[in-house]
């Protein structure tokens, strides 16, 4: 079984599930999952976790996202993007670049965003998109997001080209729709490319076609090994001797590690190393008392 991370350049028209199914067939392996969905109409970085890396999918989901997007003003769709049906058209001729920049500035920083009905968010244990397919609309709770950068690259009416850096859980199509409402003309997401997740950029992503070529010759070398994939994690060094944890459980408390600065917070993932620099595994900080939950452990001789 292959264990590692694949930075895939998802083609337009594919669902994230389509991509997972294709990779499973190409490498003849069932244990494959994605670390955060990308809408069918969107292209760009889709991180796929293989083998033991599936245990780290939640960590990869938490990483910062970067997008290149196009908003089209003057129309509203039932999905907030170009895949949906136009349900209303309005006059957008009064929208100016200055007005657009003013609204965009208000959408930078910490915000509350209501997820769209056509989304994978669960309400009452049911996916919203499944309810939407049945013609149902339910109340959704607004969720905290953070927009760290929101820049207007170009405005050629009725289309605005934008660059966005944001936190997990941000719906770019909802940003388009909300901004369109503020400007009084409506808008939807016309095109979207995810150019980055954490340190993983679209320039370094592999296409489906290239992956198929590589897989024909055996295990593709574009798959990052587990230890490389977790290299960006904060490191926790064991106080113990090198061999102490090789055949035992990972540490259960921050007290088993050398002092941290700053101290890790709840929900943070740590790469655990022994005192000679070997990766032992990955843990997650739980609670305020520094308890550690094992995420995965490397096999050591």
Image (cartoon, rainbow, N blue to C red):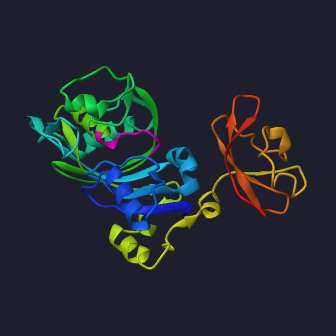
Q: Is residue 173 left or right of residue 125?
A: left
**Where is residue 211 shown, x and y percent of the image?**
40, 71
Q: What's the residue at 35%, 40% (across, down)?
A: 171
**Where is residue 159 shown, x and y percent of the image?**
19, 50
* Residue 32 in sight from this viewpoint: yes
Q: Residues in magenta?
A: 166-173
Which secondary structure dominates the residues rendered in magenta? loop
The stretch drawn in magenta includes residue 168: yes
Q: Quadrant of the image for the N terminus?
A: bottom right
Above or below, 192 relative to 80: below
**Where is residue 278 shown, x and y percent of the image?**
77, 62
Q: Quadrant of the image for the C terminus?
A: bottom right
Q: What's the residue at 56%, 46% (across, down)?
A: 59
In the displayed image of the protein, which residue is found farthest to the right?
241
The residue closer to the viewer here, 2 or 5, is: 2
Above or below, 256 relative to 31: above
**Where is residue 105 shown, x and y percent of the image?**
38, 39
Q: What's the residue at 87%, 57% (across, down)?
A: 243
Dividing the picture into quadrants, the one containing residue 299 is bottom right
The stretch drawn in magenta includes residue 93: no
């Amino acid at each position: 079984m292959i264990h590692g991370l694949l930075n895939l350049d998802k083609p337009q028209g594919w669902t994230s599930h389509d991509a997972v199914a294709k990779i499973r067939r190409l490498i003849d392996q069932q244990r494959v999952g994605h670390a955060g969905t990308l809408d069918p109409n969107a292209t760009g970085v889709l991180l796929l976790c293989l083998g033991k890396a599936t245990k780290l999918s939640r960590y990869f989901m938490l990483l910062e996202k970067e997008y290149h997007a196009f908003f089209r003003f003057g129309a509203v769709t039932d999905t907030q993007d170009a895949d949906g049906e136009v349900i209303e058209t309005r006059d957008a001729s009064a929208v100016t670049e200055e007005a657009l920049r003013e609204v965009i500035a208000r959408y930078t920083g910490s915000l509350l965003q209501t997820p769209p009905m056509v989304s994978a968010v669960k309400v009452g244990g049911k996916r919203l998109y499944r309810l939407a397919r049945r013609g149902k609309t339910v109340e959704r709770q607004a969720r905290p997001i953070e927009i760290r950068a929101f820049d207007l690259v170009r405005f050629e009416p009725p289309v605005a080209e934008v660059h966005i850096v944001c936190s997990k859980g941000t719906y770019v199509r909802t940003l388009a729709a909300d901004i369109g409402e503020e400007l009084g003309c409506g808008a939807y997401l016309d095109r979207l490319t995810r150019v980055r997740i954490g340190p993983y950029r679209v320039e370094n992503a592999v296409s489906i076609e290239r992956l198929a070529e590589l897989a024909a010759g055996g295990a593709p070398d574009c798959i990052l090994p587990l230890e490389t994939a977790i290299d960006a994690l904060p490191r926790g060094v064991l106080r113990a001797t090198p061999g102490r944890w090789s055949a035992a459980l990972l540490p259960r408390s921050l007290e088993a590690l050398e002092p941290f600065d700053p101290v890790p917070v709840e929900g943070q993932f740590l790469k655990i190393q022994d005192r000679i620099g070997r990766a032992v595994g990955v843990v997650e900080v739980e609670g305020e008392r520094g308890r550690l939950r094992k995420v995965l452990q490397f096999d050591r001789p």
